Image (spheres, grey):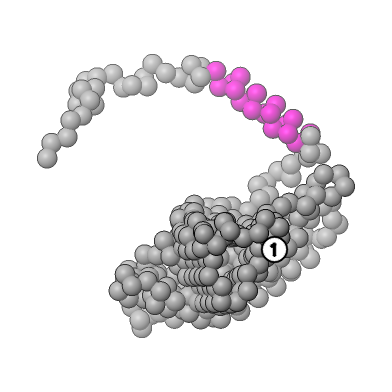
Amino acid sequence: MSVNHPPELLNTNATPINSSLNSASWELDKIVQELRNARNDWRAQRGRSREPGLRELPSRDALQQIIRELCGALFPMRLGPQELREETEDYYVGHTLDAALNELLRQVQLELIYFARQQNADDDETVLKVQANQIIRLFAAALPELRRTLDVDIQAAFQGDPAARSVDEVLLCYPGVLAIIHHRLAHTLYQLGVPLLARIVAELAHSLTGIDIHPGAEIGSGFFIDHGTGVVIGETAVIGERVRIYQAVTLGAKTFPTDDKGHLQKGLPRHPIVEDEVVIYAGATVLGRITIGKGSVIGGNVWLTRSVPPGSSITQASSRHQAPQEADV
């Protein structure tokens, strides 16, 4: 099979494309100055006229590598290195966890110190580093139970999809499983008091899968997202055991309360509660602090803003014919 290349790439005697260009062509001195002015204006508006000197925020790239290593430690023979053998599994897990947790410790320290500075707290950095150590100890101790919960999630995906040939295929291929692994790691960090790191981990999964789960969402075991693209699960959503949802489902907020100054009130419960064994089909939108009762089925493309009792079956037709006052509950 031949490939047609532009003539200038085939002609080895051609003048390099950028030979006549230099930094003066871009007026870089002017642009650098204007960018500095923009940064200084931004910092002045926020009372941050002086940065501490070193990068003070956690690193998305570092978190990406940490999560990759944690996935390998959780599932070494499936997500670990290709050359790994079962007899060296424990060594690999120990070595990988040591590297991942030490780097995660540095990222936790950065978040704690950053927020202390933002809040003008007088916490000594030594105290914050001790706090970071405790967070990592608790996070590490949670990993065995987290692995067991993920095993239930993976089994639920295998049992819930007739196209799945094995649990290994589910773990290696399904975006919903990748998203829930990230979520369970992120939710643990969120509970331990490092919400920025948790949000970065969640957004890594969002970028990879198109599934947007806020790390604050509480999700029971046996959770399965089939297909997954376009799923949105809000911060205060509560999801029970053995729940299954499909692509483009939204568990969102209906309203955003504000204070007397018009500022959004953050942290209030505003997303749905989904009880055990509920199925929500593709394109359904469930909004507000409502409850979907145990064992209910929510049909595709339903718009739901009212609670439904256990065992309900909600379709587009039944949703359209509900009373107007019920629709706004």
> Compared with residue 51, is residue 130 higher up or lower down, i.e. above or below?
below
Residue 237 image offset from top left, x and y in percent: 64, 65
Question: What span is in magenta?
Answer: 27-44
For the N terminus, the image quarter is top left
The residue at 69%/63% (across/down) is 289
Amino acid carrying label 1: it is: Arg
Instruction: State the quadrant of the C terminus.
Output: bottom right
Of residues 111 and 52, the one nearer the viewer is 111
The residue at the far right in this view is 260
Q: Which residue is mark 1?
A: 289
Observer-nearest of 246 and 132: 246
Residue 82 lies in what quarter of the image?
bottom left
42 and 274: which is toward the camera: 274
- Classed neighbour count for the residue bearing mark 1: other residues with Cα under 10 Å, few (<14), some (14–19), many (≥20): many
Which residue is most to the bottom?
87
Is 255 a magenta residue?
no
Task: Answer left or right for 171 relative to 149.
Answer: left
The residue located at (55%, 22%) in the rendering is 28
Residue 290, compared with residue 210, is above or below; it is below
Q: Quadrant of residue 203?
A: bottom right
Is residue 274 visible in the rendered image? The answer is yes
Q: Residue at x 18, y 30 (%)?
A: 4
Q: Is residue 190 visible?
A: no
Where in the figure is residue 273, as x and y percent of width and height?
Answer: 64, 69
Q: Position of residue 114 (x, y in %)?
A: 73, 53
In the picture as drawn, the residue positioned furthest to the left comes out as 1
Which of 232/93 is in front?
232
Magenta stretch: includes residue 32 = yes
- Residue found 56% across the figure and 81% down from its top: 145
Q: Is residue 108 rendered to the left or right of residue 224? A: right
